[in-house]
Image (cartoon, grey):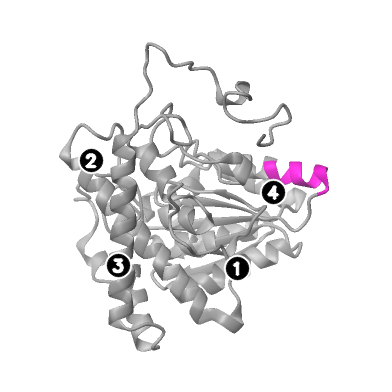
Amino acid sequence: MLQSAEMPRHTVKASDFSETYRRAFRWMLLARTTEEKIASVFRSGGKITGGVFLGKGQEAISVATGIALRNGDIFAPLIRDQAGRLAFGESLLDCTLTYLGARSGPMRGRDGNVHRGRPLEGLLPMISHLGAMISVVNGMLMAHRFQGKKNTVGAASLGDGATSTGAFHESINQAAVENLPLVLVVTNNQYAYSTPNDRQFACADLVDKAIGYGIRGHSVDGTDLGACLRVIGSAVELARQGEGPQLVVATNLRLVGHGEHDDAHYIAPHLKEMPLGRDSLAVAEAELLQNAWADSETIEGWTRDSISQVEKAIAHSLREPSPDPATEDWCALSSRHLAEGLSSNGSRG
């Protein structure tokens, strides 16, 4: 299978921060390249059914979450988490095959293009943006506890809007009471779709909500890759060490509409001129050059490699057949152990 890149998953280590930073930047670059191509295919019409949602401006937060996790951990990404998905181990083909509705994709062409995942590998298909994934992660972490699995962490991505839902309250309260190794990464991009912060919550900062649940809160500049790697990486390690749930609030600005259907006319112009309106990919590239962690020629090579990977994945996916409604067996994947390559106990045969 065509892989997303030959870069293993790593946790953040202070002794090798520059290498982690370079690796994270490459995931960000590949994610941006992938999404720009997906958007282009979507706009050309006919090949992608459903919405296309871009993570532009959010890549640093996402990649820092995915790269801090390791094999055996659980990750519940959202629609703007392509960078984190790749860093956690999702192949590029899983992304392109799903977007293009191919039967050979992980969801067999049976679900919307953002609801993809591989639960047996800890990558959860998204149910909803609105806090619904936290309880699923909690359940898996409880299962790990019952099975005697130790030192695993579950991370769930959220938007600022999700913190206003009942699902958020119930799940974070449960995680706190059970002292689960849960990391909630909230991206406050200033708008819940088109609803601004001041019409959504009255607290001074979303991180203050951690106090009410008796858990630890962390704030980070979501446009700063280095800061995201350190803060989110630290939160993951605290959870792994038994310090209970961690709430990370990363501040940035969504640099595109909610989806390709949305022109984002409601975003206040002055926000785009503030530091939170910076493009995290451009900020990370400047940091690489300033610290001499990479030169322009190297970054250009990474860019060419990303474009090549994406073009190959798209070309491959376009050749794959879609499900045939007349012949497809539409029963749930979980009830088709043999057909889906699984043994009776749910492991791969």
Q: Which residue is mark 2?
A: 42
Tell me the kind of residue under disc 1: Thr
Left or right: residue 136 versus residue 206 is right
Secondary element at image label 4: helix
Q: Quadrant of the C terminus?
A: top right
Q: Nearer the viewer, residue 313 or 14?
A: 313
Q: Which mark is residue 175?
A: 4
Q: Nearer the viewer, mark 2 or mark 3?
A: 3
Identify the mark nearer the N-term, 1 or 2. Answer: 1
Q: Nearer the viewer, mark 1 or mark 3?
A: 3
| 139, above or below 183, in the image | above
State the separation of the CA atoms marked 1 and 2: 34 Å
Residue positioned 62% across, 21% down in the render: 335
Secondary element at image label 2: helix
Tell me the kind of residue under disc 3: Thr
State the separation of the CA atoms marked 4 and 2: 39 Å
Residue 144 lies in the magenta-colored region? yes
Q: Percent from the top left, x then y, of residue 94?
A: 44, 43
Q: Nearer the viewer, mark 4 or mark 3?
A: 3
- The extreme left residue here reads 44
Left or right: residue 201 versus residue 65 is left
Secondary element at image label 1: loop
Q: Which residue is mark 3?
A: 303
Task: Characterize the magenta stretch by its predominant secondary structure.
Answer: helix
Tell me the kind of residue under disc 2: Phe
Identify the mark nearer the N-term, 4 or 3. Answer: 4
Query: CB atoms at circles 1 and 4 under 8 Å apart?
Result: no
| 57, above or below 300, in the image | above
Residue positioned 53% across, 56% down in the render: 88
State the separation of the CA atoms marked 1 and 3: 24 Å
